[in-house]
Image (cartoon, grey):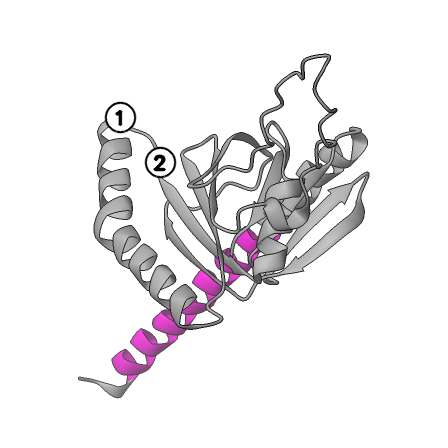
Amino acid sequence: MHPLKILIILLSMLSLTAHGAALSESDRLMRENSLLRSEVQLAKSTQIYVILDLQKSRVLIKGKGVVLQDLPLKSFTTWGAPVQPKALTLQRKTALIEPGREEIRPKKSEEEPGSELQALQLEDMPARFRLNFDEGIRVYVKPASAGLLSFILNLMSSLKSYLVTRPLGTLWNGLHRQNYTEIVLYLSETDAKSLYWSFLQTFHCLIASP
């Protein structure tokens, strides 16, 4: 091939690469701008909101723009459709073992008064739970492996996710023309319990994905 033609092809490829990089940077800035706009709207309300900042590996619980809790992520995985930079509403929070108070039975007059009901504490919260948002987004929170038992539980959970949950979730939502996104967050056990305790249903959430 003629050297001039080779040079023209190389210059064209460089031009396309530079254009693609510019578009990528433009998309990134647009996403950041949309996230900031969404947070400004949430900060104007009186309700507490949560930001899952996967870019900085942190979970921020905020109110009026002020950080109330800053929970570092040990690691995370994502699957499925990208998350849009807008406020999402927590629809459901589920755990295999839900925290519950002891049942109170009224005492008869001749019986001794029972002990006072103990309020639920942080240690009573589950460290493994699921957060269901609108837009077909599922967030699984798990304690990071800190021993053999937690390692085995996380391994079994990951296998179930890769072999069952993700493919079936993607297929089912695809048949209904809906997106499916799965995000798995690994925190320390204490931080995972704190997130469960703090994240109430109907709270709004922003997800800043990479």
Residue drawn at point x = 61 percent, y = 53 percent: 29
Residue drawn at point x = 26 percent, y = 26 percent: 176
Characterize the local packing of mark 2: few (<14), some (14-19) or many (20 or more) Cα atoms within 10 angstroms.
Answer: some
In the displayed structure, 95 sits above or below 178; it is: below
Q: Which of 41 and 27 is in front in this view?
A: 41
Q: Are marks 2 and 1 in contact (CB under 8 Å)?
A: no
Task: List x then y, in percent, for residue 80.
Answer: 35, 47
Q: What element carries label 1?
A: loop
Q: Quadrant of residue 2?
A: bottom left
Characterize the local packing of mark 1: few (<14), some (14-19) or many (20 or more) Cα atoms within 10 angstroms.
Answer: few
Looking at the rendered structure, the kind of residue marked 2 is Asn
Residue 26 falls inside the magenta stretch: yes
Residue drawn at point x = 35 percent, y = 36 percent: 179
Q: Which of 20 and 34 is in front in this view?
A: 34
In the displayed structure, 5 sits above or below 83; it is: below
Left or right of residue 85, residue 42 in this image: right
Work out how far the residue at label 2 is from the one at label 1, CA to CA, in angstroms: 9 Å
Q: Is mark 2 on a helix, strand or loop?
A: loop
Q: Residue 179 carries which label?
A: 2
Which residue is the site of mark 1? 176
